[in-house]
Amino acid sequence: MSLHPIEASRLHARRERVFLVISGLFLGTLAMLNILGIMRFIHFGTIETEMWGPLTFGVMVGVLPYPITFLCTDLISELYGRARANAVVWVGLLLNLWVLFILWIGGMLPGFETMDPQTGTLAKDAADRLPTYFEVQKFAFGATFASMAAYLMAQFTDVWMFHFWKRLTKGRHLWLRNNASTLISQIVDTVAVILITYSVGGLVNVIKPDDDVVQSLIILMITGYVFKLVCALIDTAPLYWLVPRLSRWLEIDPIAEHRHLEDPGPESAQ
């Protein structure tokens, strides 16, 4: 297969295509989880506790694919460096804005829905619900707004912590920087997304009027974080499997190359 003029070599083309696959998985997962958002909660079970009473373990359906995004940014950080990882995070933010724009303009353009002749607004069905698109739009708006703020804080925390531990350990202990960066950033993400989602009214169907709001929010944070914690520990295995194989195939030395880029010597500074 002949190379395009922009591809300097077969090795360069291979590296860019792998980067495209990883970043594409990251961005595709991000778009999917924002659409799914809080449309449904997954029930993992209930246990009885003396302090809290019945403790229900459930997570938003949008949380299910979210741990994959941290595996992707850790792979990009390890193989391609901090600058590329941060660039993908910023593209993810633009993707969120694009999703919001399409959701908004899709509702603004005229459709075939039945209108209420008295109010001039969309007519609701017998269950007092709007047409399907607008129900999805309502949930997705709240979930995307919440996830955008939490996403920026969590992903930049993940990238920064990953490289902090990499510098501290001089490139050793991949398991440490993978888990330490992800687990800390997941705390940031879980707390932020629950609080923001609650503030914009996205948890109205989960937290009932007679529920203790603080207790309900804490339970949602705990259950959401436990799920992410388990996923973060599990993704250490694929990271350890992928990094050495991709490093050899792409001819990248994650330690020497990135140490040279981040701490250039006198010759490279000239």
Image (cartoon, grey):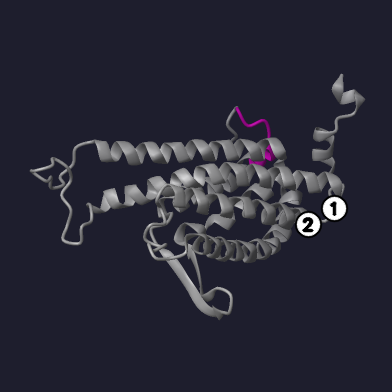
Three-letter residue code for mark 1: Arg
- Asked which secondary structure carries label 2, the reply is helix
Q: Residues within 10 Å of mark 2 (few under 14, many from 20)?
A: some
- Residue 36 lies, in percent from the top left, at 41, 55
- Residue 264 lies, in percent from the top left, at 86, 30
Three-letter residue code for mark 2: Leu
Up the image or down, 49 lies above or below 105; here it is below
- Residue 80 lies, in percent from the top left, at 71, 41
- Asked which secondary structure carries label 1, the reply is loop
Which of these two is toward me, 132 or 246?
A: 132
Does residue 8 show up magenta in the picture? yes
Q: Residue furthest right?
A: 266
Which of these two is toward me, 108 or 26?
A: 108
Does residue 200 show up magenta in the picture? no
Span of residues in magenta: 6-15
Marker disc for residue 250: none
Cα distance, mark 1 to mark 2?
9 Å
Marker disc for residue 172: 1
Q: Residues within 10 Å of mark 1 (few under 14, many from 20)?
A: few
- Which residue is painted at 59% across and 51% down in the image? 189
Kindly indicate the quadrant of the structure image that contains residue 204: bottom left
* Residue ID for mark 2: 176
- Which residue is painted at 74% across and 55% down in the image? 180
- Residue 228 lies, in percent from the top left, at 60, 61
Disc 1 vs disc 2: which is toward the camera?
A: 2
Can residue 1 be seen by looking at this rendering?
no
Can residue 118 be seen by looking at this rendering?
yes
Q: Are marks 1 and 2 in contact (CB under 8 Å)?
A: no
Dominant SS of magenta comes to helix
Q: Is residue 163 left or right of residue 50?
A: right
- Which residue is painted at 49% across and 48% down in the image? 196
